[in-house]
């Protein structure tokens, strides 16, 4: 009898756990968003903070390949899943990468970099966020490279969900 009660209690905990855990995923691949800073303005200084040299993430690649405006709609959250970056013409021993932060508070959401250990040339990398990072404010992208920032590209991947 005692063994049966313990077994039932453990079974109850096992079955209760999945219902309380919440996984947020894309409904379909077409919900995927690729955001970027494209011909963007400089990020303003956060309240009480110092201005940085980043660019506002203001654009997204549409399903047809065209560029559209990127904004997080009121009542929704952008679930950030990964950031890909590439820089061309990076000297040996130098690094290239990114820092992604919120515009309003300057809080770092994601960052990543790679060091060129080979000949002068391209450097790339990917930063995965699992589980996805929930973002509800505008984003600022800093490219951390010692070379021409226009030779760097960064793709911010995620999807939109209703915000709680």
Image (tube, rainbow, N blue to C red):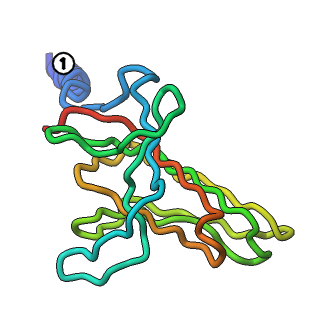
Is residue 83 shown left or right of residue 133? right
Compared with 19, 101 (above or below) is below
Q: Residues within 10 Å of mark 1 (few under 14, many from 20)?
A: few
Q: How far from the left and from the top, in percent, is residue 82?
A: 48, 46
Residue marked by disc 1: 8
Q: How far from the left and from the top, in percent, is residue 80?
A: 38, 45
Compared with 144, 67 (above or below) is above
Q: Quadrant of residue 3?
A: top left
Is residue 57 shown left or right of residue 85? left
Q: Secondary structure at mark 1?
A: helix
Q: How far from the left and from the top, in percent, is residue 163?
A: 17, 38
In the image, what residue occupies the spot 48% across and 27% down?
A: 63
Q: Nearer the viewer, residue 50 or 69?
A: 69
Count the labels in the image: 1
Q: Which quadrant does the C terminus fall into?
A: top left
Q: Which quadrant does the N terminus fall into?
A: top left
Residue 22 in sight here: yes
In the image, what residue occupies the spot 30% across and 42% down?
A: 78
Q: Quadrant of residue 96?
A: bottom right
In the image, what residue occupies the spot 22% across and 66% down?
A: 104
In the image, what residue occupies the spot 43% across and 76% down?
A: 53
Is residue 163 shown left or right of residue 65? left
Compared with 59, 149 (above or below) is below
Q: How far from the left and from the top, in percent, is residue 158?
A: 41, 40
Residue 6 in sight here: no
């Amino acid at each position: 009898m005692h063994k049966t009660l313990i077994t039932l209690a453990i079974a109850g905990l096992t079955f209760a756990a999945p219902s309380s855990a919440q996984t947020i995923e894309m409904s379909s691949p077409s919900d995927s968003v690729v955001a970027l800073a494209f011909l963007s303005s400089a990020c303003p200084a956060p309240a009480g903070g110092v201005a940085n040299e980043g660019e506002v993430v203001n654009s997204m690649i549409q399903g047809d390949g065209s560029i559209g405006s990127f904004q997080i709609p009121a009542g929704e959250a952008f679930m950030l899943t990964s950031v890909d970056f590439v820089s061309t013409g990076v000297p040996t021993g130098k690094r290239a990468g990114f820092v992604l932060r919120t515009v309003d508070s300057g809080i770092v959401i994601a960052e990543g970099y790679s060091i060129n250990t080979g000949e002068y040339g391209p450097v790339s990398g990917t930063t995965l966020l699992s589980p996805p990072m929930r973002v509800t404010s505008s984003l600022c992208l800093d490219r951390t490279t010692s070379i021409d920032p226009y030779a760097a590209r960064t793709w911010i991947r995620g999807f939109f969900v209703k915000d709680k």
